[in-house]
Every structure is written in structure tokens, then in C-alpha cells.
Image: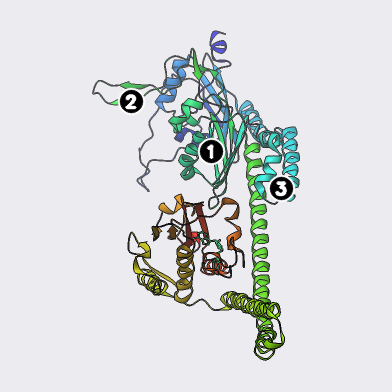
Amino acid sequence: MPTRKRLLGLRYPSSDIPQQARHLYTLNWLRLIPDVSYQPVALTPTNNPVTQQPLDLSLSVLRSVSPLHLEYLQNMGVTASMSISLMQDQKLWGLIACHHLSPKYVSYNIRTVCEFIGQVMSAELANKVTNEDTAYKVQLKTLQAQFIEALSQTEYFLDGMVQLEPELLQLVNATGAVICSASQCICVGETPAEADVRALLNWMKPHFHQSLFETRSLSQNYPAAESFKAIASGVLALEISKVHHNYILWFRPEVVQTVNWGGNPNKPVEVLADNSLRMSPRRSFDLWQETVRASALPWKPCEIEAVIELRSLLVGVVLRQADELALMNFELQRSNEELDSFAYIASHDLKEPLRGIHNYANFLMEDYATALDGDGVAKLQTMVRLTQRMEDLINSLLHFSRLGRAELMRQTVNLDELVHQTIATLTIARPQNEVEFRIPRFLPEVKCDRAQVNELFTNLISNAIKYNNKAEKWIEIGYLAGQEGEIAGAGNVSPITFYVGDNGIGIPPEHLDKIFQIFRRLHGRDDFGGGTGAGLTIARKIAERHGGRIWVKSIPAEGSTFYFTLAAEADA
Ligand code: ADP
């Protein structure tokens, strides 16, 4: 039969069944048109006299057919047609469409059997879908178990993911994957360049739905993907944490496919005599070949499910890590407090015997100086000096431990005024022109502990004065706001970053961390005006107590700049 041959093996677009028809097919298991050239008969009256509405004929077997449908069948060359609905989850999944070249009336018995076939097949469909890819689903579960194991053994989830690079691809049968965090992108297999991935991710962020984004033809929605369609036409992306910018993306390559349609699947539109448009069914059902490009194999529901499960696993790990971090922070805070009180008690108790040693050494010098020779007196003098130094150290320690214990008294402080006062106090004993102070712009008002921040500036400015052997010394005090701070190393959501810069002796790179340790000096005890080596430790404590941090950039012999913030980055 020529018609049968012509129609077999071809695809028909879903638009062949309009929405209203789809609804009717879900209500009725069968639809029979014994002869497309039947003569329709009108209903009388047109409207129901009681409701004044047209009669609902949805469930009527004798209901007439839409003229478009008849035209479609005629174009197809069939005279009789019957369809059996196939349902899944109360939705039309498909149709068994039966055609006949001559008029055909199907008896009630056969129709009942057909309806039964439709019901049995629909029930079977649900089974088929559940059991589809059983072996593949089992494989995916095994992979998930491997992820659980790897992730439970790592500190940071990215490390766990990296250990399982091939499994990461197998999990969704992808050819490439990228694990993205704010600071790095780890690429596995065939992926677009990192810059392309970052740009894609930025575009994709608003398109995530329940933490998932999925497409088999990316360039259709994101034209920039055209350039890498060969490796990434299909994309499946998982948002693990918006806050920490953690994402995983999987890629599939373009698979050029030839689709055999039963006629041009694009719905033809006819232009009528009055220039209006009319949808019309296509006239030809001859083979119409379409080459589909920039499209990958579709992501299977079980693959998407596997990815969703991976997400809950990762979120669990991230949450556990956050919990552990919180616990560690708590422990750290407690041990810091213990250390502070230990330092306080120790230094407090050490002071008294030290005073005694100091006094007795002085008594010895006063009362027995004549009984000692020059060497003996010199040794006693050294002893007095050393006890004096030890007292200075103990006082610094005491002060440091008090800082950790004291309540922070935050208030609005005009830092411009504060810094000018600090400079005035520090230069009181010095000739005015010895150091040039530069303050490029007014310093802002900030909520902070006035006394502590005063001490912070005092320590930094006095160091900047001390550690400078240039003939023309200068010190610059200022701040960086917003993105300016990023350049100085303050992170991308930084609060205001203050700085004190100088053109002094600088600090060798290997000592940049050490200078913040207590009692750590880089010079001889009395060089550069001496000091206990506690100033920067105290400065760091003050910045940290305010939720901020302190760091330094320096070039030996050229100068140093100390940066600090007085609020946490997230508060910015
Ligand atoms: P102190 O000044 O009492 O020695 P600090 O804790 O203030 O203690 O400083 C620690 C060390 O860091 C100093 O001994 C010095 O070597 C170095 N340092 C601090 N500030 C500067 C600076 N502006 N330029 C160069 N070196 C510095």
C-alpha cells in the first residue's frame, strides 16, 4: 500500500495535535472517524436553552471533527482514521494512529478491545519508564556511593571531587566537567576555556531552577556558545552554593543528527485573500529531512536525578564542614580567652618578684658599691637594666592580654580628627619638618572603639617614623573604599581599608609574617629607637577584635605600607 509505506518510520511534530485536541484525547481513549468526507449535521438549537451555552460535546462519540483535522487527513491521503490514546501520569503520552485508505467503520467489539489495548499499554508504559536503563541506574548508584566515600574523607569538598575525575564524567555520561569556586575552575575532560566557562556561568546564574540548569542545545539560548558547540552543546549545571560561588558544570558535544519528518514540520501559515493569516495543516507528507546541529544527546531523567542527589550530598558535606568550622572557631576563641587570662595572671604575678629583684639590685649598688670592684658594679648595672627591660615586656604582655578581655566600646569616631591628634602627640618632641605627613583625603567617620583605634594608628605611625633612615621622610595615611581595596589585597567585598605607608627601610619578604608575632623585632634591641616588639601584635589584635584584619606590603629599602580593616568583609 503506497500510503502506508510513505508514512512509516517518519516523525510527526507534536504541534500536529493542537492543545484542545490533546485535551479531548486525554478524556476519551478512542477517537473514530469512519469517513473523512462525512456530512456534518448541525445541532438544534445551537445553545442549550437552559444555560444559554453551547452543549459540551467533549465526551460525545458522534462529535464532529475540526475542519483542520479533516484537511490534515485528506492531505495525508487517508479516508478513515482511528486513534487510541496512550496515557502516562494522566497526560497524553502518545497515540496509536490507525489509518485506512477507504471508509471504515470499526465495530463496537473491536473498539472495546482497542480501548483495552490502550489501557494495558498505558499501564505497561509506567513500568517501562521505571525499569528503563535499570543497569545504568545501578551504575549511577555505585558512582554515588564512591562520591560519598571520597567526600567523607576530605576536609574540603573540592578535594574530594577532584579525586574522582573520571567518575564525575561517568555520573552523567558527559565528556567534560568543570568544578568552579570563586577562586578557581578545575577542568576535567573536554571543556570550553576557563574564561568562556566563567562568562557562561555569569549568564546562567539567573536561569537556575531549583539549583539546576539543563539544555541540550546551549547556543540556541546563549549565542556565544556557538564558538564551542563542538564540545559543549549540551550543558547540565548544578549550583551548590550561591554564597561561596560553588558550581559544577557538565558538557556534552554536538551530535549532528538527521531527522526524517513526514513533511515539513514547521507549521505552514496560509495568507488569505484579505491578507489575514490562517494556520493550515501541511499538504505534503513526503520525507522531509532535517539536519539538527548544535545539539547534544538529551540528558536522561536518571542522570538529572543523579546530579540532584549529588547536590544534596555536597550540601550535606558543606554544612558539616561549616559546623566543624564553627566548633573550631568556638574552641579557638575559648583557648584564646584562656591564653589571655593566663598571660594576665602570669604577667601580673611576675611583676611583684621582678620589682623585688630590681629594688634589691639597686640597694646593692647604693649600699655595697664601695665593696665591689668596677666589674661587679657594671654587672649590677646590667642587672638593673635587664629587670627594667623585663618589666617593659611584662607590661606589654599585660596590656596585650587586657585588650583581649576588655569590652569593645564602639562609637562613631571621626578618624580624620583622631589621626591629626595622634600625629600631633607623636611629633611633639620632634622638629616639625622632620617627617612630611600626607593625608590625601579626609578620613571617614567609623564606628569603632576610639581608644583602641587610636592605639592602632599610634603604633603604625610611630613605627613609620622610627623605621626610616631616609633624609626626606614621608608618611602617607589614607583609605581605600570598595574595589580600590581589592588591589591592596582586601578581597572583593571588603569594607574600608585604611593604610599607613612610609618610605622607610622596608621589610624583607621572609619577615612579613613574623613581625606580627609578639616580642619579635628584626633589629638589635636598641636600634631604631628600641621597642618591645609588641606594637604590631597589639595592632593586629585591635583590628581582629573589630572583625577586621591587618597586613603589610613592603619593598626593602623603599618603604612599607600597612593595611587594615575594622569590619568583617561580609559586613561591607
Ligand atoms: P617594635 O617597634 O617595638 O619593635 P613592632 O611590633 O611595632 O615592635 O614591630 C615589629 C618589627 O617590625 C619591628 O622591630 C620592625 O623590625 C618591623 N617594623 C614595624 N614597622 C615597620 C615599618 N614601618 N618599616 C619597617 N619595619 C617595620
Q: N-terminal of the two: label 2 or label 3?
A: 3
Amino acid found under the numbered disc labelled 3 = Leu
Farthest residue in the bottom direction? 367
Amino acid found under the numbered disc labelled 2 = Arg
Q: Nearer the viewer, residue 455 or 488?
A: 455
The circle on residue 151 is 3
The reply, left or right, for residue 523 in relation to residue 416 is right
Residue 109 in view (yes/no): yes
Give SS at disc 2: strand
Quadrant location of the N terminus? top right
Q: How far apart are the two marked residues, 2 and 1, measured between alpha carbons?
A: 28 Å
Where 541 sits versus 253, above or below?
A: below
Where 88 sits versus 227, above or below?
A: below
Q: N-terminal of the two: label 2 or label 1?
A: 1
Give SS at disc 3: helix
- Which of the 4 image quarters holds residue 324? bottom right
Q: Nearer the viewer, mark 2 or mark 1?
A: 2
Q: Nearer the viewer, residue 170 or 301?
A: 170
Q: Report ligand 1 position as a quadrant.
A: bottom right
Residue that badge 1 annotates = 27
Residue 60 in view (yes/no): no
Could you classify mark 2 by the number of other residues whose Cα lies within 10 Å: few (under 14), some (14-19), or many (20 or more)?
few
- Which of the 4 image quarters holds residue 167? top right
